[in-house]
Amino acid sequence: MKSFLYYVPYAVLAALTFPSIFYATGNQLTALAGTLAALVLAYFDCGLVIVALGAVIAALVSSVWL
């Protein structure tokens, strides 16, 4: 699996992933909050579980506030 993913261009993964992210919550602002949280956590080299949990928590908190 790892060798297969090595050959998949990052642009294709982004093109498949980002539209799904912005339509998953039904609200563009909560999706943006989750995406930004995930990007910040990934930038600081947090693990995959921490990044995913951070994105979910950010989307949940932003949906409560909006």
Image (spheres, grey):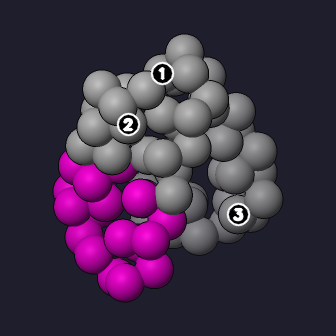
Residue 51 image point, x, y percent: 31, 60
Type of residue at label 2?
A: Ser
Q: Is residue 18 left or right of residue 34?
A: right
Q: In terms of secondary structure, where does tag 2 sit?
A: helix
Q: Which residue is mark 3?
A: 10
Other-residue count near label 1 (Cα within 10 Å), few / some / many at <14 / 14–19 / ≥20: some
Q: In terms of secondary structure, where does tag 3 sit?
A: helix
Q: Is residue 22 left or right of residue 46?
A: right
Q: CA distance from mark 1 to mark 2?
A: 11 Å
Residue 33 image point, x, y percent: 48, 47
Quarter of image, res 18: top right
Q: How many marks?
A: 3
Q: Is residue 33 left or right of residue 56?
A: right
Q: Which mark is residue 62?
A: 2
Is residue 52 a member of the stretch shown in magenta? yes
Q: Main secondary structure of the magenta part?
A: helix
Vertical order, 3 against 24 (above or below): below
Magenta segment range? 37-56
